[in-house]
Image (spheres, rainbow, N blue to C red):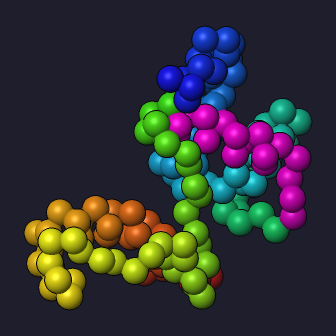
Amino acid sequence: MPELAFLNHVRREDFELDLRRYDLHREHGLSYRLIALLESQQKRGSAVPRQRVVGNKVRGESEVAKSVGRIYEAINRERYTARRRRLDQPAAGFPPFSCPDHPGNNCTVDCEHWQAYWKRVQPTLPSDDTGILR
């Protein structure tokens, strides 16, 4: 399994760092940039930032993205695509729904094809608080 090949030669410290980054991104919703900023400030002993949005590029954010991708691929056996957060193109890249069992897409919410489609598209749609400044 190629997505698990890195486990054969990764150091324990690097693997734990990848897991921590994955948790911060997937479970807590932090961006790659914010995770990289947190890590760089922890190394320097600086205060941890309270903001959730970082405007400028931060050294190390591409490494954070690679870490998250490696762990996601190992768990799910597929490439990770970060969720879209743009309001103008929700669900971009997804073809329109077409049910092979129900002509004219007259599905009920119990249709397994509709549920599978919704499961893929729903994370890309804006949430109730998308775009709200805090």
Q: Nearer the viewer, residue 96 or 63?
A: 96
Q: Which residues are magenta?
A: 56-73
**Dominant SS type (magenta):** helix
Q: Vertical placement of 105 versus 70: above or below?
A: below
Q: Position of residue 57 (x, y in %)?
A: 86, 59
Q: Residue at x 86, y 53 (%)?
A: 58
Q: Is residue 4 shown to the viewer in this render?
A: yes
Location of the C terminus (image quadrant): bottom right
Q: Vertical placement of 118 versus 10: above or below?
A: below
Q: Residue at x 33, y 78 (%)?
A: 97
The image quarter containing residue 81 is bottom right
Q: Nearer the viewer, residue 115 or 134?
A: 115
Q: Nearer the viewer, residue 88 or 47?
A: 88
Is 94 positioned to the left or the right of 33 in the image? left
Q: Is residue 76 magenta?
A: no
Q: Is residue 20 shown to the viewer in this render?
A: no
